[in-house]
Image (cartoon, rainbow, N blue to C red):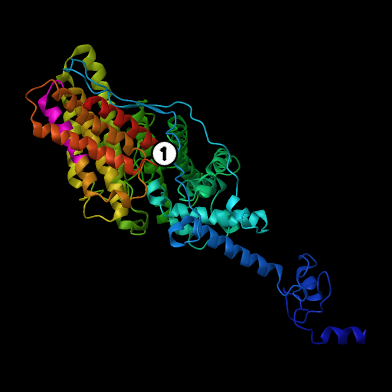
Amino acid sequence: MDQQKSQSRRQLDKGQACYNCRLRCDSVRPICGPCARFGGGALEDCEYTAESGIARSQVLEEQISIIESRIQQLEQPNENQASVGLHNPYQSSYGSLALTNPQPQAGPSGSRSQPPPTLIAQPSGEGSPPEFYSDIVSLNISLPTPTIKSILTLHRVDNFLRRASQIGFFLNTQMFDSISSRAALSQIVCPALIDAICLWGSHLSHSDALSSQTTTLLPEALRSAAMSLSNQRNPNTVIQTIQAEALLAQYFFRNARILEGKYHASTAVSIALSSGFHKIRSANTQSNAPQSLTGYPPTAEEEGERINAFWAVLMLNNTWLAADGSPGDVSYAIVDTPWPLDIELYSQTHLQPSHSSSTVENFLTNVPDHATSLVALHAKAAIVFDQACRLATQFTETMNHTNQPNNHRAEYSRLHQVIESLKEALPPISSSEVESQSLLLVIYSFVHTATIQLNNPFRLHFDFSRSRAINAAIAIVDCMRQSNLPEFGYIDAIVGTLWMAASQVFMTELSQARYNSGSSRQNVQQFRQGVETILAAMSVFSDCQMIGMQLDTARRNYAAIRN
């Protein structure tokens, strides 16, 4: 016994002590005495560096560092001469979704009004599955699969966060600030949202190897979203599931898969409505949110996230339904939730009304509300676009039967006044920062396209409607010229539809000018420049499959006029 004690106290040579404890180690294998006592024998075998000079933990740390460096090379190939050349991952065909628009008229206009643009979805295929983790495997590194997934997950999250606000991420991104592993991420973010973010992170990557992983990540994201609320319905899971569904909808819209996009947008709205997000701070005390989400008082930031969540998914759902010509499925009459704010402003409680009611109905009757944040202006712009599309459809159907445009004068005048008031509230686009400029261009495009849609049914009957539509299309082109488009990097896929409507105004005028000797050469030149500016702007964002497909349609229409 004395001999054993003396042996345990002797000075161990370098490398003979366990890498885990180092202190008073008895060098017993496979688990030394201190480690066995500390973990009750539950720890893994001890690591000794005497044989190799380096512990496995140190090897893994070094390998992780190499992978992180490799990922940086893939993301920023121009900063390292040794980086591999990458090709554009978006050079595949535009897909099979067809855009049906009124064709430019080849002769004098008839008496029937033209309907607004309609999106028609058809099935589209996926590419072949990529070779997963190919770039990591090529490094000949033997990392465990969970470690590789953790590194790639954090990289995708970081890639997504650079564009989060532009994609419609309404949650506070500060939740990601202290995350250092996938395990840590899973403790605060539900699987559905993690998978949706990873899908977007890979999609936005400039690396062909990383962006090609979307074919593997998409089924995982869809599966997680479908199961997200099956086991628990706590407030965090609910709002994060809404966010995940919204991101999936945006992904499908961007990739010209409209039917699937509408499904996920509708799902997001349904969850928000069932959670009472349309009745936040409602003046009607009988219409408050269900107790399941309000069992405890939310913080100002939590309530702000719910407010922003509701408006984000309402906009997403209603604008794409309007663009598609589908009936609306959410009545604005039920909305009492106050207008949204920038997420960091919710801590200033004086900015929000204590009670709110008939939010959208008041807006549509020109009741002042002083809601001027960019997110509020975005919501208002989306609403007037939605309303203009629906009124235009009603006007067209009625006039094709009665040919009495004056029957709609009151409805037309009311919405026209709302649109004009909203235009006056918009900040100038030219003096804004790039990120705000991107959102402002979407907002301006919504508002001016609302004017186009509202006046389209009456263009053949009233000169003032024709002039208003032309001026609105010119205003969209002016906004494009004031914006630094190449710096945006990303823009909402809905602008493809909005800009198509503007280009159609110009092309219709050009088509009619061929049969009207009274058209001035100056006007014809202005209309041509308008079309060409829109085509150039769409080409900047043609990596978005939806916009790229619409660009192809617009080019064909323009070529038909010029021939």
Q: Looking at the image, how many numbered discs can be counted on the residues? A: 1
Give the residue drawn at x 21%, y 49%.
482
Q: Would you say residue 262 is visible in this rendering?
A: yes
Q: Quadrant of the N terminus?
A: bottom right
Give the vertical position of 112 relative to 96 (above or below): above
Q: Nearer the viewer, residue 337 or 164?
A: 164
Give the vertical position of 516 relative to 495 (above or below): above
Dot 1 surroundings within 10 Å: few (below 14), some, or many (20 or more)?
many
In this image, 510 relative to 2: left or right?
left
Percent of width and height locating residue 379: 31, 42
Give the residue drawn at x 35%, y 45%.
491
The span shown in magenta is 460-476
Give the residue drawn at x 78%, y 84%.
13
**What residue does disc 1 label?**
254
In this image, 102 relative to 68: left or right?
left
Q: Would you say residue 297 is visible in this rendering?
A: no
Percent of width and height locating residue 248: 47, 40
Please tell me in which quadrant of the rendered image residue 30 appears: bottom right
